[in-house]
Amino acid sequence: MFDEFISSFVFTNEETTQTFHHQWFSQGQLHECATCYSSIDADEPPSQHWLRGGEASQGLQLTKQQQAVLDIIESRQIETFFFCDESSKDKLEHFMGETCARGIPELLRWMFQNNTVAVEFNLACYVNAMDQVLIFQSGSLRVDHHYDVDESVGVVYEMLMQRIENYLSSSSEYGMAECSITRLKVQVKRIRVEAEGQSADSSFFALPLQLQEEEGLTATTGCSTSESELASLRSAYLKHFRECNGYFPPNMRVNLYGLQQCKTTKELYVVPYHISETLQQLPNKNFLILNNIMGQFQRLHELSTPVNSIERDQTSSPLKDLHCRRCRTKFSRRSKLHIHQKLRCGQDFSVDSMHADIVEIYEQCLPISRSVFQHACYGITKPKTIMRKGQFVPIECDWRSESSVKVQHGPCVVISNAQHSSPCKFY
């Protein structure tokens, strides 16, 4: 919805106030953003825009129950998750679309906790095509920044849906209307920084993809700040951030910028945080403040040039001829093209099918509250059991009607082409 738009981030100065607001132009109309707005006193530093409900509110906040679930996921090293919903049999894309828009991104953001600097994931969807189950699986994709999660899952979703549509139209007697998806499997691997001393090493923390193409944000040619200078500046920033609530002394001769994300369009933008006067015609050095998923400080990223203005040129047009040279797929953002290329145009995507008599059972799963992910989500704690219908196993099943799966410890996730099977049962 927001791919084809031109954003403008504007500061308005009046006698006693300074106001920040976000606008975008789409299809010739000006839209005012309802979520990006802030007003402070005219004599206050710009950092106060982002400290009053802006920067702090963008950090991931977990309830005690959610933190307890995350602790279990970590202690048991759970890396495989199922999303299930039996009520979504009417439409192929309904459950999958909702889960890829909300549930899976939220799960991946959870995984960025506790010294995690990147996650690698793949997604598999189980397509019920009348008398068979088709398994479409994506290639693995590494996400190096938590701000890239939504776009990464979105690109994987679009590529999988295209693969499903192409397969059904060419290889199956069933169309999209006769199929449904009620189970999604996500496999997640976390890449961590174990040693505390490594936290200051910039090589462990990437910039978000949306910023990597911005001029001056990634180029470090001419940046000459030594490690000792950077450590001193980092200490001064943290001291005044904690003790003075973002008020920095006039003799702090640097320009600091923050990073914000629009909750409506998901667009990232760089905003002024502390701008110092320039003395003796010596230019101030410029740094971008980068925080982790919790809103806690990670590092200072040096910029080669100051961010002169965050107001976009409203006369420019979105990129129209941005496409993959290999498969010619068109994109409206470079970040999406970059993700598409990391996935090698879907070269590592696969499709498989389950035999009509085969049933997969995952026992003793960890249930995760529906209030977190909208649909039922389960962490897989044990290897799957593969059986044939009617085969004796220490689980009571009746595949002729609504499935009755009894286990001693926790819920069970079932994968079967039985039309009335339930993905999970509690006992």
Image: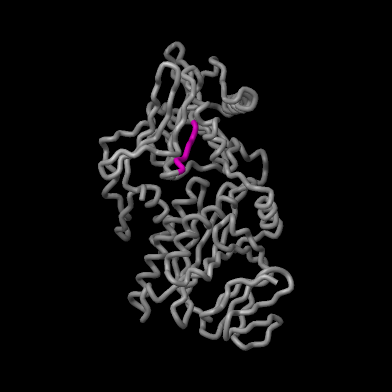
Farthest right residue in view: 408
- The residue segment tinted magenta is 258-263
Q: Position of residue 148 (x, y in %)?
A: 48, 48
Above or below — where is 258 with respect to 264? above
Choose top left, top right, bottom left or bottom right for residue 427. Answer: bottom right
Q: Is residue 104 magenta?
A: no
Describe residue 422's horizontal placement relative to residue 154 as left or right. Answer: right
Q: Position of residue 409 (x, y in %)?
A: 73, 70
Is residue 71 shown above or below 15? below
Residue 327: percent from left, percent from top: 32, 60
305 and 401: which is toward the camera? 401
Q: Residue at x 55, y 30 (%)?
A: 51
Residue 193 visible in the shown view: no
Magenta stretch secondary structure, dominant: strand
Q: Is residue 362 left or right of residue 304?
A: right
Residue 358 spot, x, y in % from top left? 56, 82
Picture residue at 56% right of the left edge, 75% below the top: 415
Tell which of 273 and 29 is nearer to you: 29
Vertical order, 241 against 194 (above or below): above
